Image (cartoon, rainbow, N blue to C red):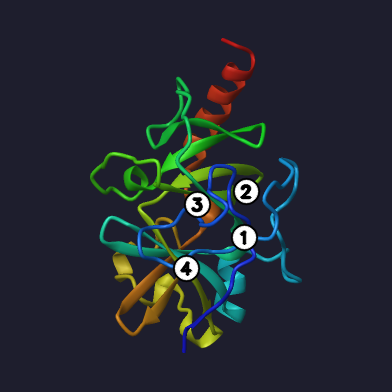
Amino acid sequence: MVRRKASTLPPGPSAPPEANPVGKGQPGIPGDDPSPAPSSTVPRSKAAGRSNKGLLLSAGGAVLAFTVGDQRYGLPVESVRQIIEMVAITPLPGAPEVVLGVINYHGQVIPLIDMRLRLLEPPQPYTLRTPILIVRLGERLAGLVVDMVIGVLELPPQQVQDPMEILPRELAPQPLYLAAFAPLPDGLLPILEPEALLHQREIRALSRAMSHQRRGE
């Protein structure tokens, strides 16, 4: 059975104190630290050395559910640092197409990824209430623009399945951005692998673009 779990993710810098930046009518995710230091790290579990995929498949865990287009997705809660609302975006010449630009996150410049572009959904205008998930992609923090945040789900290990067991055999060598699937009463929940959201060539292009920006080129 899927259980909702209270989250400890703090509200972002642009979120009003009485609410978190989530979609209309959806549950918020209350926080406990309104102003974390830019250098603070993502909370880690005792099994932090293992990959998100390996940990989910063996032990289950908490995932943050959100929507992009008409599809629900999940991210391991351990990879999510905060949820904020839309902020000013600075263009980043030379960045991959899915990167909208950079934002100022508590004094730290981080890239902003449009999950509609990443997941091949048609674009839509942003609003001041558009949520941004601040996540750790490997060694880098990044913002993910999504449509709506649903909430945190606690998944038992028997409810988490390897994508290789569900996807057609011809797709098995390249499961895209998936870490796992979780069957829910109203359909499958694809759980994304944060570190797979940017391809290696995109990571290299992003690193070059941000290096040029730091040097003022």
Badge 4 marks a residue whose secondary structure is strand
Please tell me whether mark 2 or mark 4 is closer to you in this view: 4
For mark 1, does the 10 Å Cα neighbourhood hold few (<14), some (14 to 19), or many (20 or more) residues? many
User: In this figure, which residue is indicated by the disc labeled 3?
Assistant: 196
Q: Earlier in the sequence, mark 2 or mark 4?
A: 2
Q: CA distance from mark 3 to mark 2?
A: 9 Å
Badge 3 marks a residue whose secondary structure is helix
Q: CA distance from mark 3 to mark 1?
A: 22 Å
Kind of residue at disc 2: Gly
For mark 3, does the 10 Å Cα neighbourhood hold few (<14), some (14 to 19), or many (20 or more) residues? some
Residue 161 in percent (x, y) is at: 45, 78
Q: Earlier in the sequence, mark 3 or mark 4?
A: 4
Q: Earlier in the sequence, mark 4 or mark 1?
A: 1
Kind of residue at disc 3: Ala
**Mark seen at residue 151:** 4
Q: Earlier in the sequence, mark 1 or mark 2?
A: 1
Residue drawn at x 53%, y 35% is: 111
Please tell me whether mark 3 or mark 1 is closer to you in this view: 1
Q: Earlier in the sequence, mark 3 or mark 1?
A: 1
Q: Earlier in the sequence, mark 3 or mark 2?
A: 2
Q: CA distance from mark 2 to mark 4?
A: 23 Å
Kind of residue at disc 4: Gly
User: In this figure, which residue is indicated by the disc labeled 1?
Assistant: 9
Residue 129 in percent (x, y) is at: 40, 47
Q: CA distance from mark 4 to mark 1?
A: 11 Å
For mark 4, does the 10 Å Cα neighbourhood hold few (<14), some (14 to 19), or many (20 or more) residues? some
User: In this figure, which residue is indicated by the disc labeled 2?
Assistant: 138
Badge 2 marks a residue whose secondary structure is loop
